[in-house]
C-alpha cells in the first residue's frame, strides 16, 4: 500500500498548495458569482477538468443556480454580467480558448480553471497568440503539475495520478461556499437542493427550490 500512501500525501500537499496560493482568487470568483446571481445573471458551467462540474450541478447540497453549458443555447444567449466557467489544464485547448475568447468579447465574465505550471510551458494555439489565463476575467490555478500526473512509479514510464480533477472540484466547492455566504450577506437565500433519493428530498426540490429559481433566479 506504499503507492496509496504516497498518493494520499500528494493530494494533501496539492490541496494545501491550493489553499496557500488560490484563496484570494477563490474569494473573487465566489463574489463574482454571487453578484451575478443577485443581478439576475446566469451561472453556466462548461466542462471542468473531465466533467467535475457534474459534482455541483443539480445534486444534494448544491445550489440550483449552476447550469450545464449547452452550446446550441448558451453560445448565443449568454450576455454581459453572466458567468461562464471553463477549463483547460494546459490553457491551450482550442475549443475552450475559442469559446472563452468569444464570451469575454461579449462581456460575459469567464472564470477559467488551468494549471499555470503546465500553461507556461506550452505554446498558444489561438490566433491571438494568447492562452486562457492571459485573457479570462479570472483564472483559478488548479496547481496540477505540467503534464498533469503527480507521482513517479518505478517500472512505469508515465507518471501516475492526475491532479487537476480533485483540485478543481475542491476549488469549485470553495468558490461555491464563498458565493453562498455572500448571497446570504446580501439578504438572498440561494436554493440549495436536497438529495432526491432521501425521503422528501425530491418533493422539496420540485415544490420549493425549482419554483423559486424560476421566479427569482436563485
Image (cartoon, rainbow, N blue to C red):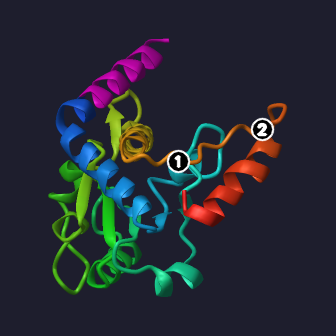
Q: Which residue is nearer to you in this view: 179 or 188?
A: 188
- Is residue 11 magenta-colored? yes
* Residue 35 location (% of width, % of height): 34, 58
Question: Disc 2 on helix, strand or loop?
Answer: helix
Near mark 1 (Cα within 10 A), the count class, few <14, some 14-19 or many ≥20, is: many
In the shown orientation, is residue 206 left or right of residue 194? right
In the shown orientation, is residue 60 left or right of residue 185? right
Q: Is residue 105 above or below residue 171?
A: below
Residue occupying the point 52% across, 49% down: 52
Magenta region, residue range: 1-16
Q: Which residue is nearer to you in this view: 18 or 8?
A: 18
Near mark 2 (Cα within 10 A), the count class, few <14, some 14-19 or many ≥20, is: some
Residue occupying the point 84% across, 31% down: 199
* Residue 63 location (% of width, % of height): 55, 47
- Is residue 66 magenta-colored? no
CA gap, disc 2 to disc 1? 16 Å
* Residue 169 location (% of width, % of height): 45, 42
Q: Quadrant of residue 159?
A: top left
> Label 1, on which residue?
190
Query: Can residue 112 be seen in the rendering of this structure?
Result: yes
Q: Main secondary structure of the magenta part?
A: helix
> Label 2, on which residue?
201
Amino acid at each position: 500500500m506504499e503507492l496509496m500512501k504516497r498518493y494520499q500525501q500528494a493530494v494533501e500537499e496539492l490541496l494545501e498548495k491550493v489553499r496557500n496560493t488560490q484563496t484570494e482568487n477563490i474569494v473573487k470568483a465566489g463574489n463574482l458569482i454571487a453578484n451575478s446571481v443577485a443581478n439576475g445573471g446566469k451561472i453556466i458551467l462548461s466542462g471542468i477538468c473531465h466533467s467535475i462540474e457534474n459534482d455541483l450541478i443539480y445534486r444534494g447540497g448544491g445550489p440550483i443556480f449552476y447550469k450545464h453549458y449547452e452550446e446550441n443555447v448558451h453560445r448565443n444567449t449568454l450576455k454581459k454580467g453572466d458567468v461562464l466557467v471553463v477549463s483547460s489544464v494546459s490553457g491551450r485547448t482550442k475549443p475552450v480558448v475559442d469559446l472563452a475568447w468569444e464570451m469575454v468579447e461579449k462581456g460575459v465574465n469567464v472564470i477559467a480553471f488551468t494549471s499555470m505550471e503546465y500553461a507556461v510551458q506550452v505554446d498558444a494555439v489561438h490566433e491571438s497568440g494568447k492562452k486562457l489565463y492571459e485573457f479570462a476575467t479570472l483564472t483559478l490555478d488548479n496547481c496540477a503539475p505540467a503534464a498533469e500526473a503527480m507521482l513517479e512509479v518505478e517500472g512505469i514510464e508515465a507518471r501516475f495520478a492526475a491532479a487537476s480533477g480533485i483540485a478543481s472540484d475542491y476549488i469549485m466547492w470553495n468558490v461555491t461556499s464563498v458565493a453562498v455566504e455572500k448571497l446570504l450577506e446580501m439578504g438572498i437565500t440561494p436554493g440549495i437542493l436536497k438529495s432526491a433519493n432521501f425521503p422528501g428530498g425530491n418533493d422539496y426540490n420540485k415544490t420549493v427550490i425549482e419554483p423559486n429559481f424560476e421566479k427569482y433566479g436563485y
